[in-house]
Every structure is written in structure tokens, then in C-alpha cells.
């Protein structure tokens, strides 16, 4: 067996740093995935208000995706990532004080800037440049799967900490939730200086220097280059449809607790178990995609993920906890596999490195647009159709979108004429 070459070892070590940063920065923003009802109690807000917070986060992301790509093409990714981690952690300290609803809206908006404007495109571009043309699937699969592993480890510790705090004599949901928030904030404040000191973005800086000394095209021309790529649009559609399937899993916690009589700790255990499917699904899909074709494998996965989510809508109220666990794990495995592959299609879009960040920003703006309306759609359906029916309609709608994504991936896989 050949030992890894220094260049390969460097690439994978840098990938690990990016993975840990990406795995640490987002859990606070999506804390409701495992603690939704506890958040409602601790902050004394309604489910609709919490979804408005999530929707604001989505709006900020949409506004900042393209500027994020512009920043990634012109500034040090190492500095952008370190700043993002620090800002997100400091906002988390404010969040831990259980502020008013008005303050929550500000926090979520600022989180959107810290993780969308300065982090998102920078970390995607770094991975795209680290990977060779035939390694895009595995690198992005390892990125998403590894990020999921970090999130699952942190979530497992968080659930254990939450359960322990509740078991104490003076335990309450508010105190328990604070301990969880402190855990995530502590990790962010430790990672920020580590990324600044250890991440080596010399290759990206070299590309930046080349573009600085070459004839620069205008921003308008760069936009046109990106928008005239058919593959860019298909890639964006795949991400939009795949992301909707994944986003549906954020509502599993409340759905299972409200309609199946499970405790908060039991539901948290099930949803955390789902998180452990991310490293398995993402990494496996990445290697299979490189072995076969990322686009073909993505098409199959989108179809299977759509069908599995539709199963969630037909779970009987009398279903055993183990059966619900099996369904949730299956959905998690497939949706995470989709996430592990959909950015690998970027390698086949033939976008120059000097505007790759911009391409990532535009794809992200289209692909993650569902984050703006999905919280509002789910809140409306759940309130209009109580008793679990709203959730079922929600899951079926997103399953249909997932099938559209499967067709887009199929078109992307077809030979270019």
C-alpha cells in the first residue's frame, strides 16, 4: 500500500480543518432541530415566531450568497473563516441570555451575516480547489459527512448534557438549554484562533494574486459567464430540491413529540441518531459518485430520498418507537447522501477559479432559496391543519419537489451535445 504523498496529506489535513469549522459553526443556528419545544419554553415564544427567526436567517443568506462569492474571490479565506467563527460564538453568548423576541430577530439576522456572507462561499471554494477533477465527489462527500460527524458528536454531548441538567433537583428546560448553548459557544471560540493560525490558504492566495495581476473582467461580465452555463442552473435546481428534502428533517423533532407521545429526551435521541447517518451517507455517496458518476448517483439518491420522506407522512400513530427510528434513519441516510454529492457537480461546470466563488454564490442563492419560504410554509400548514395532518402535507409536497430534482440530476448526467 502506497503512503500518502505530501501534497495529498496536506490537502486532507486542510480538509479536516475546514470540516471542523463547518461542523462547529451551524448547530447554534439550527438548535431547534433537536430542542425545538425546549426553545419555545425557554424563550417564551410561539412556534410561528421561531419559524420567523429561521425565515429571517434564510432571507439574509439569500441576500449575502452572491456577495459572499465575491468576497471569497478577493480576500483570504483563512481570515474570513476565523472571523465567522468568532462572530457566531459571540452572538451565541447573547443568545444564551434568553433575550426578547426582538433581540432574537437581530441575533438570527447577524448569524446570517456571520455564516452566510463571510463563511459559506469561502469554505466551499477552498474545498473545490483542494480536490482534483476526479476527486470532487469524495472531497465534498467527506466535507459534508465529516461536518455531520462533528455535528453528531457535539449533538450527542449536548443531549447528554441536556438530560443530565434536567435530572438535577433544580433542573429546568431553561437551565438545561443554557448548558447546551454554552457548549457550542465554547467550541466556536476555541476554533476561531485555531483556524486563523493553522489553515493554509496559500494556494487560494496564489490564485488571488494571479487574478490581481491579470486583466480583470468586470463584475457584470463575470455574472454573465456564470449565468450562461446550463450546468450551473441544473446544479442549482438539484441543490434546491435536495435541500428541501433535508430541511424537512428539521421538523421531525416537534412532529414526533407532538403526535406520537414521545418525550423530549426520546425525540432528541432519535434525531441525534439521525445525525450519525450523515458521515455514513455523505462519505459513501462521495466515493461512489467518483467511481461511477456524481450526477447519475445523485439522480438515484434524490428519487429514493423523496420516496422515503413520503413514508414519513404515512406513519401510523401506533407505530413503535423502533420503527419510527428506522424510518428516520433511512431518511437521514439518503438526504445526507444527497447533500454529500450535490456540490460535487460543480467540478463539471468548468468555471475558472478566479470566479469560482461567484459561481458558488449564485448557485447557493438559487439552491438555498427554499430556506426563505419553507419555515413559513410549514408553520402555515401546521396551524391550518392541526393533529399531524399539516406535517404530512408538508412532507408530501417536498417529496414531489425532490423528484423534480432527480430529473434535473438526470439531465446533468446526460452527455453534452
Image (spheres, helix red, strand yellow):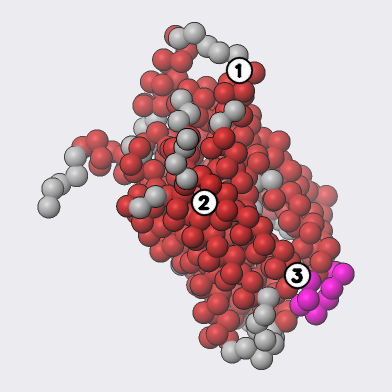
Q: Quick one: 306 or 90, which is closer to the camera?
A: 306
Work out whether residue 294 can be spotted: yes
Mark toward the viewer: 3 or 2: 2
Work out whether residue 22 can be spotted: no
**Which secondary structure lies at badge 1?**
helix
Discs 3, 2 touching: Cβ within 8 Å: no
Q: Which residue is mark 3?
A: 393
**Residue at point 73% right, 81% down?**
259
In the image, 193: left or right of 363? left
Q: Quick one: 130 or 403, which is closer to the camera?
A: 403
In the image, 394: left or right of 34? right
Q: Which residue is mark 2?
A: 410
**Which secondary structure lies at badge 3?**
helix
What is the magenta range? 383-390
Numbered mark located on residue 8 in the image? none
Discs 1, 2 touching: Cβ within 8 Å: no
Residue 314: percent from the left, percent from the top?
Answer: 67, 80
Mark 1, other Cα within 10 Å: few <14 / some 14–19 / many ≥20: few
Q: Which residue is mark 1?
A: 221
Residue 16: percent from the left, percent from the top?
Answer: 37, 47
Choose the circle earlier in sequence order: 3 or 2.
3
Q: CA distance from mark 1 to mark 2?
A: 29 Å
Choose the circle earlier in sequence order: 3 or 1.
1
Choose the circle earlier in sequence order: 1 or 2.
1
Mark toward the viewer: 1 or 2: 2
In the image, 21: left or right of 366? left
**Residue at point 52% right, 11% down?**
216
Discs 3, 1 touching: Cβ within 8 Å: no
Amino acid at each position: 500500500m502506497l503512503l500518502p504523498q505530501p501534497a495529498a496529506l496536506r490537502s486532507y489535513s486542510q480538509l479536516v480543518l475546514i470540516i471542523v469549522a463547518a461542523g462547529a459553526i451551524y448547530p447554534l443556528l439550527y438548535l431547534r432541530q433537536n430542542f425545538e419545544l425546549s426553545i419555545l419554553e425557554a424563550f417564551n415564544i410561539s412556534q410561528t415566531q421561531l419559524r420567523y427567526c429561521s425565515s429571517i436567517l434564510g432571507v439574509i443568506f439569500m441576500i449575502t450568497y452572491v456577495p459572499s462569492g465575491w468576497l471569497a474571490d478577493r480576500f483570504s479565506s483563512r481570515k474570513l473563516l476565523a472571523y465567522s467563527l468568532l462572530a457566531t460564538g459571540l452572538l451565541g453568548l447573547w443568545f444564551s441570555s434568553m433575550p426578547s423576541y426582538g433581540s432574537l430577530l437581530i441575533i438570527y439576522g447577524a448569524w446570517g451575516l456571520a455564516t452566510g456572507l463571510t463563511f459559506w462561499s469561502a469554505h466551499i471554494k477552498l474545498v473545490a480547489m483542494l480536490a482534483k477533477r476526479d476527486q470532487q465527489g469524495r472531497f465534498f462527500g467527506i466535507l459534508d459527512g465529516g461536518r455531520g460527524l462533528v455535528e453528531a458528536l457535539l449533538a450527542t454531548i449536548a443531549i447528554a448534557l441536556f438530560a443530565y441538567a434536567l435530572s438535577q433537583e433544580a433542573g429546568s428546560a431553561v437551565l438545561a438549554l443554557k448548558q447546551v448553548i454554552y457548549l457550542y459557544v465554547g467550541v466556536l471560540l476555541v476554533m476561531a484562533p485555531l483556524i486563523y493560525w493553522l489553515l493554509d490558504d496559500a494556494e487560494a492566495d496564489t490564485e488571488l494574486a494571479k487574478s490581481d495581476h491579470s486583466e480583470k473582467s468586470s463584475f457584470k461580465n463575470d455574472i454573465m459567464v456564470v449565468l450562461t452555463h446550463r450546468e450551473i442552473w441544473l446544479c442549482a435546481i438539484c441543490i434546491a430540491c435536495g435541500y428541501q428534502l433535508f430541511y424537512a428533517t428539521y421538523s421531525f423533532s416537534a412532529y414526533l413529540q407532538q403526535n406520537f407521545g414521545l418525550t423530549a429526551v426520546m425525540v432528541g435521541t432519535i434525531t441525534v441518531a439521525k445525525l450519525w447517518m450523515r458521515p455514513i451517507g455523505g462519505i459513501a455517496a462521495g466515493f461512489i459518485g467518483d467511481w461511477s458518476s456524481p450526477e447519475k448517483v445523485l439522480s438515484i439518491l434524490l428519487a429514493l430520498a423523496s420516496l422515503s420522506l413520503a413514508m414519513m407522512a404515512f406513519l401510523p400513530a401506533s407505530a413503535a418507537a423502533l420503527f419510527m427510528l428506522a424510518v428516520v434513519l433511512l431518511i437521514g441516510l439518503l438526504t445526507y447522501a444527497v447533500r454529500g454529492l450535490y456540490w460535487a457537480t460543480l467540478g463539471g461546470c468548468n468555471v475558472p477559479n478566479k470566479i469560482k466563488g461567484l459561481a458558488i454564490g449564485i448557485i447557493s442563492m438559487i439552491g438555498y432559496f427554499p430556506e426563505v419560504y419553507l419555515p413559513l410554509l410549514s408553520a402555515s400548514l401546521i396551524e391550518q391543519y392541526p393533529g399531524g395532518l399539516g406535517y404530512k402535507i408538508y412532507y408530501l409536497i417536498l417529496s414531489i419537489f425532490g423528484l423534480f430534482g432527480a430529473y434535473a440530476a438526470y439531465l446533468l448526467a446526460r452527455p453534452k451535445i
